[in-house]
Image (spheres, rainbow, N blue to C red):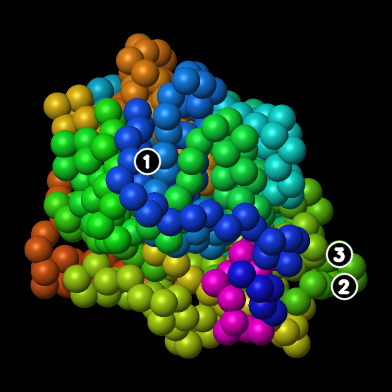
Amino acid sequence: MAPVSAVDGGLSLWLDQAAAAGSAPSRPALAADADADVAIVGAGYTGLWTAYYLAKADPSLRIVVLEREFAGFGASGRNGGWCSSLFPASLAKVARVGGGRERAVALQRALNDTVDEVGRVVADEGIDCHFAKGGTVVLARTPVQLARAKASVEEEREYGFGEEDVRLLSAAEASAMVGASNVLGGTFTPHCAAIQPAMLARGLAEAVERLGVTIHERTAVTAIRGGVVQTAGGARVRAGKVVRATEGYTPSIAGFQRDVAPVYSLMVATEPLPEEVWEQIGLAGRQTFSDFRHLIIYGQRTADGRLAFGGRGAPYHFGSRIEPGYDRDDRVHAEIRSTLRELFPVLKDTAFTHRWGGALGVPRDWFASVGYDPGRRLGWAGGYVGDGVGATNLAGRTLADLLTGRDTELTRLPWVNHRSPRWEPEPLRWLGANIGLRTMSAADAEEERTGKSSVRAKVFGRFLGH
């Protein structure tokens, strides 16, 4: 994959940079039937972390990873680069669905610790993914957003998380970290690292190969049944256990069409910014940043001095379709650039070098899960709703324990063996997903106009992660 610098040229800034850093190994497609102890479908973060911890736990295992394109092609090579402790469902929802307060707290503490575990592995394996644990600032830029910031910290306190986990920022404190416009306050958590996501995916792929794992690229999987993985080329893998690690691409596999809905998130990246601009923007510690609007935005300062910034807003496509053309949407990308310039007026004349997008996986109840079904010999993890860079590591460690039959603290966490309802058939799925998108966008406009919390957002929030 040659480096591309044109705005519409590459799959993402991250993949372009990874390609420019050196040629990735060319991994052959699966050419003939094969046998394995564990077959993993998908060479994104979930599949690669699972392979890594399985190989560490039992070096004798024959592990085969099958990837439709190349390692890191999907969300793992296109995301915002937040290795965070985020989970798509709130603490209150995890407690309600997952068996109580203590179990919700255990999951959140495991996710908090996961950021440091990723940092440990990338250091041990020599993966240069620009890991910088600067934490996350979520800005409050309206009185309604400030009220949400205060409520979010209060909820954390109710569950026993202290100042060391999340704290409320004054306007001056928040502005000192992120020099955005109209800042009234915000929150800060240290439990996040900015990374170069494609370099993490590439480094993980190379690390698992050093451990004896086989990766087959350009090998599309069409079906998984009874420990047999069928590929589009006709070759099969017979395995004692199979792991489905396909996230937004899950609907492309027979029998899983309604397990998750692929929803697009789009991003842009600026040219490298001069130091005098960074003096106004801040982010000196490479903090990741967002704000308390309903329609999610996210950004980071890259290691080479750019702003990489993204958000939701692209429509869900009928039939859970994923197409290369959906990676770019002129309207949504224009809105993302406009939002970034509104946040940081100093960028009004700044050039943007990249724009891209990709599909993430949304389960019907917005509750990520990891599990193993012995009867079907099938393990899975996913439904991260865009919060997967950190959670995939926890999922990989958990799957390694589940597949090797170990009863551990990880296998008792409340997302283990959680079963999300299936999405409705079309056209109901298309209607529901896109109504939700429009509702949250309208709620932000309503709050800006009225200065009051949106009732429609509160009502629709019951169907999301709240």
Q: What x and y, as percent, mark residue 200?
A: 62, 48
Gap in angstroms between the C-alphas marked 2 and 1: 44 Å
- Mark 1 vs 3: CB contact within 8 A: no
| Mark 3 lies on residue | 279
Q: Nearer the viewer, residue 169 or 207?
A: 207
Q: Which mark is residue 144?
A: none
Circle 2: is it few (<14), some (14-19), or many (20+) Cα within 10 Å? few
Crowd around label 1: few <14 · some 14–19 · many ≥20 (10 Å): many
Q: Which residue is mark 1?
A: 40
Q: CA distance from mark 2 to mark 3?
A: 9 Å
Q: Would you say residue 371 is visible in this rendering?
A: no
Residue where numbered disc 2 is placed: 274
Q: Which residue is at a point 54% across and 32% down the rendered structure image?
A: 212
Residue 446 vs 66, above or below: the answer is: below
User: Based on the displayed image, in which of its 4 quarters is residue 407 positioned?
Assistant: top left
Span highlighted in magenta in the image: 6-17
Q: Residue at x 57, y 84 (%)?
A: 8
Residue 106 lies in quadrant: top left
Looking at the image, residue 35 lies above or below residue 141: above
Comparing marks 2 and 3, which lies closer to the viewer? 2
